[in-house]
Image (cartoon, helix red, strand yellow):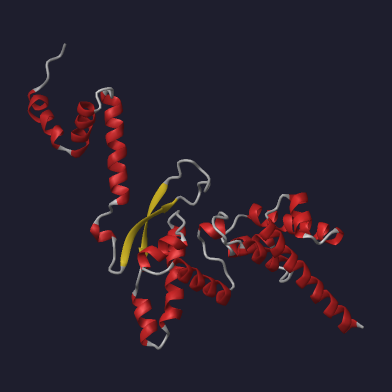
Amino acid sequence: MIAPSYNQKHYRPALKRFLHPILSALFQRELTRLGPMLAARLATEVIGLFEAFCPAAEHLQPGQLLWTVPDTNTSPHARHRPLVPVILTLTSPEDAQRLSQGVTVPDNLQQALARLFREAHAQGGLLSVRDAALFLHRDQGYISRFRQRYETKHDCILPHPGSLQDVGSTLSHKTQAVRKVIFERKDPAAVAREINHTQSSVDRYLRDYHRVKTLHAVNPDPVFIHQCTNIAKHVVRQYIKLIEEQKQLDEKKSDKQD
């Protein structure tokens, strides 16, 4: 057996002064069933979580906050849904500039909300309306109305759980996708990019719309269509509105040609 060198004997104990070995020793002492390897791995995980959820102060700019949101790539029905830390801009120089130029506070709030939802999505998470209402100290319905006004005004869908994962009552992304393809004759791939959806999702909305349209010609009762397709009743009703709207447009075109 080779005896440890002077440097090893002299400096190796200093390694115990750092965070990782301190945590590893704590886990081995308090969780006696953990061996050295598992304790070291757990220490690594804890340090990784701390670094992710507690970024250095210089990473945050004035007007920003750190928040945690569900991972955008995880199913909303997953039992253990991971959270990701995101840095959100509550207020920015652009906000102050718009207000100084006479933009109203409600209009400025719409812009700020759009920024919050998009920032979270760009960082791999989905900010909910509930969370936005929480740190803006507003009623959830109030925030929903302003989000919807922005989407209507700019003909877009902001990324949040209700629009991307069918969480909550927000389902207008389905009808908007169908409207853009059927009424505006846009390419489904382009529509998918516009509303922050996958191509397969847009294809599914179109397929469901045509299924509803086929059955509506046989029997317009929403309950009947729901039972045949297993598509949610409120979604069926939204598609029926589009079908009736398309029928009216076709009749107007026919009248003009006559």
Residue at far right of view? 258
Q: Residue reaching furthest top? A: 1
Q: Residue at coordinates 19% horizontally, 30% vertically from top-left?
A: 25
Of residue 222 and residue 70, the one placed in the foreground of this image is 222
Residue occupying the point 30% across, 27% down: 38
The C terminus lies in quadrant: bottom right
Residue drawn at the location 69% of the way across and 64% of the way down: 238
Residue at x 24% of width, y 59% of height: 57
The quarter of the rendered structure image containing the N terminus is top left
Residue closest to the far bottom: 102
Q: Decide: is 55 above or below 101.
A: above
Left/right placement of residue 243 relative to residue 190 reads right
Q: Is residue 188 left or right of residue 35?
A: right
- Residue 101 appears at what percent x and percent y? 39, 88
Lateral position of residue 247 relative to residue 237, left or right:
right
Q: Position of residue 95 (x, y in %)?
A: 37, 77
Question: From what the image shows, is residue 143 above or below residue 31?
Answer: below
